[in-house]
Image (spheres, rainbow, N blue to C red):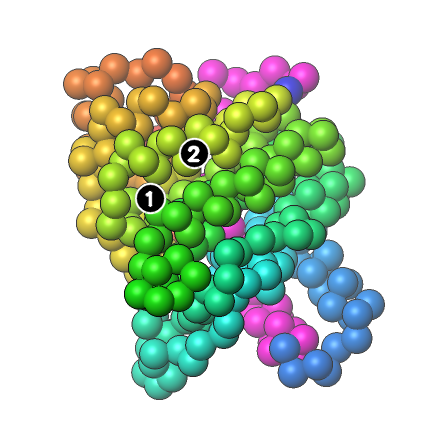
């Protein structure tokens, strides 16, 4: 990254809020009421809005707001082969984690045409002169809507399912780097949500970034579907295994937990950058600059 950044520089975790007009447009796109050009124009406009908002706020490193992604990862499943769509478990009431799309693996999962993040990044680069970062979900998070059961292609082995997604993520990261992304954030909120061993998830992460020539960020949180967490909101259980991650920056949520566990870094020791969330996007309380500075 050629631009020299301040000591305490700012960037956002990734996803930007959708304005009302964008929700309306998405409904029309799903109903096939928009043509291909209409849809492209809509997504481009939404992405520009996210970029301009960050620039006006004085953010140092810009991302595209992930405006082309629906509910963080749901749009990626259409790019995967080997899945059969299932009915959502809940169709009424508040939209929650049991309301989301589900899939069953009918064969080994592949992503033959990539995840689509490269085109997102290329567009981002044309829209700002500020430093930029790319974001890409990791294999554990990409697996979150796939329900493996005894007798299916993975026979209830979620780790095997996740490992099959590692080559696709690695290829995506290398393609991003080739497109000029010198900073890539891998998003793995599900590493703190899906039951499993932190050490195994770190092995997957390291396999994903193998050979990727870029600054690597590792984002772990506890879920944020319509501002609701899903996992136990603690990082402590993931250490010291997390220190084996081959990344240059950890990106963690703190503000919406009232900065809980921030003192843990004094115990562990910091051997790389730590990006701390200091704006609580899950609260309707609008923080003042002093609130943020205090954190």
Taking depth in this image into account, of 49 and 81 the one nearest to the observer is 81
Q: Dot 1: within a 10 Å radius of its alpha carbon, few (fewer than 14), some, or many (20 or more) residues?
A: many
Indicate which disc residue 123 carries.
none
Most extreme residue toward the front is 151
- Label 2 crowding class (10 Å Cα cut-off): few <14, some 14-19, many 20+? many
Asked whether residue 185 is drawn in magenta, I would say no
Query: In the picture shown, does residue 54 fall above or below 88?
Result: above
Report x, y in % for residue 109.
Answer: 53, 56
Seen as rendered, the residue at the extreme right is: 37
User: With respect to residue 213, does 170 lie above or below?
Assistant: below
Asked if residue 27 can be seen in this view, the reply is yes
Q: Report the residue marked by disc 2.
A: 205
Q: Give the residues in magenta.
A: 2-29
Q: Residue at x 19, y 25 (%)?
A: 263
**Residue located beneath label 1 in the image:** 191
Which residue occupies 72% across, 65% down? 42
Asked if residue 57 can be seen in this view, the reply is no
Secondary structure category for the residue under label 2: helix
Residue at x 64%, y 32% (from the top left corner): 174
91 relative to 183 in the view: left or right = left
- Label 2 with label 1: CB-CB less than 8 Å: yes
Q: Is residue 25 above or below residue 4?
A: below
Residue at image position (36%, 32%) is: 202
Q: Quadrant of residue 270?
A: top left
Q: Quadrant of the C terminus?
A: top left
Q: Quadrant of residue 54?
A: top right
Q: Quadrant of the N terminus?
A: top right
Q: Which is nearer the N-term, disc 2 or disc 1? A: 1
Q: Identify the element where label 1 is drawn.
A: helix
């Amino acid at each position: 990254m050629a631009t020299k950044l301040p000591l305490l520089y700012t960037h956002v975790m990734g996803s930007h809020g959708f304005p009302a007009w964008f929700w309306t447009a998405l409904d029309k796109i799903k109903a096939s009421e928009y043509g291909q050009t209409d849809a492209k124009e809509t997504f481009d406009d939404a992405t520009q809005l996210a970029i301009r908002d960050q620039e006006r706020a004085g953010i140092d490193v810009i991302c595209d707001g992930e405006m082309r992604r629906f509910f963080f990862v749901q749009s990626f499943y259409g790019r995967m082969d080997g899945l059969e769509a299932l009915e959502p478990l809940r169709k009424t009431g508040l939209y929650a984690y049991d309301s989301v799309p589900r899939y069953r693996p009918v064969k080994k999962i592949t992503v033959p045409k990539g995840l689509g993040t490269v085109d997102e990044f290329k567009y981002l680069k044309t829209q700002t002169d500020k430093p930029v970062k790319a974001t890409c979900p990791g294999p554990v998070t990409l697996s979150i809507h796939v329900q493996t059961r005894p007798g299916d292609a993975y026979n209830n082995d979620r780790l095997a399912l996740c490992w099959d997604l590692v080559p696709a993520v690695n290829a995506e990261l290398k393609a991003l780097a080739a497109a000029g992304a010198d900073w890539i954030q891998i998003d793995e909120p599900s590493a703190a949500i899906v039951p499993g061993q932190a050490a195994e998830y770190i092995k997957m992460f390291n396999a994903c970034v193998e050979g990727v020539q870029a600054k690597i960020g590792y984002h772990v949180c506890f879920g944020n579907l319509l501002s609701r967490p899903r996992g136990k909101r603690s990082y402590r259980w993931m250490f010291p295994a997390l220190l084996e991650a081959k990344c240059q920056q950890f990106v963690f949520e703190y503000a919406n937990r009232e900065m809980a566990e921030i003192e843990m870094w004094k115990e562990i020791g910091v051997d790389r950058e730590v990006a701390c969330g200091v704006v609580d996007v899950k609260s309707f309380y609008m923080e003042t600059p002093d609130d943020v500075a205090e954190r």
